[in-house]
Image (cartoon, grey):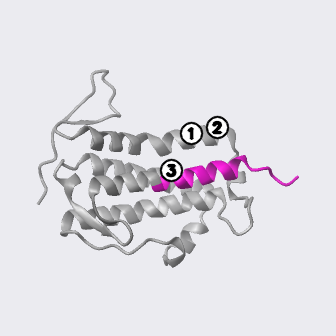
Amino acid sequence: MHSDHGSRSAPPDGSANHVILAGMNSADLSRIQRCETQLKDFLAELLNKVPLDTLSQVTVAGKWSAREHLAHLARYHEVFLERLERMLADSAPVFARYRAEDDPAWEAWRQLSSEQILSRLDTLRRKVVSRLQGLSEDDFQRTGIHPRLGKMKLSMWLEFFLVHEGHHLYAVLMQAAAPRPA
């Protein structure tokens, strides 16, 4: 159905871990690059300074721990991949608002250790990036309907995914920086 995926070439510096998709517009290329680096770079910096065992500590009563925010992001990667496939297969599918509290899979994700969450998050991020790199410019024009934001192109869904992620990474950072009880 959408088989024109553009050609790929290695960047001039010869690095193999960055893919350039010929014919893709610069905004979508930028989003894919941010998808490749945003989470990885944040976690590398955070985990260099914060022991894993502190991620489970709740610093504000009634709010998620840093580990729970990361679990939510990992679960949302699965949701995003499902939505992506529906947008590619169907014409303007309608999506319900995603709320972790309403998700039957959420409680299982919440119970995972920080190590398990980070491992799954890494695997899922690789799947998202790989899937995005295989899309054509036309694929990024496909649409899905968000209950609050309305009809959005896949390129805007990816932007929404990254902004949503940034919100939760900010919460992780604030949790990690919060004073710990002695």
- What is the spatial separation of the Cα atoms under label 1 and label 2, in whole angstroms? 6 Å
Q: What are the residue bounds of the magenta stretch?
A: 164-182
Whether residue 118 can be seen here: no
Comparing labels 3 and 1, the label whose residue is closer to the camera: 3
Q: What residue type is labelled 2?
A: Asn
Identify the element where label 3 is drawn.
helix
Q: Which amino acid does label 1 sit on?
A: Ala
Residue at the spot x=44%, y=71% of the render? 98
Image coordinates for residue 72, horizontal then vertical, percent: 53, 63
Image coordinates for residue 160, horizontal then vertical, percent: 40, 56
Marks 3 and 2 close (CB-CB < 8 Å):
no
**Residue 44: assigned label:** 1
Left or right side of 66 for 74: left
Identify the element where label 1 is drawn.
helix
- What is the spatial separation of the Cα atoms under label 3 and label 2, in whole angstroms? 19 Å
From the image, tell me which residue sits under label 3: 166
Left or right side of 17 for 103: right
Q: Which of 86 and 8 lies nearest the eye of the viewer?
A: 86
Image quarter (top left, top right, bottom left or bottom right) of the N terminus: bottom left
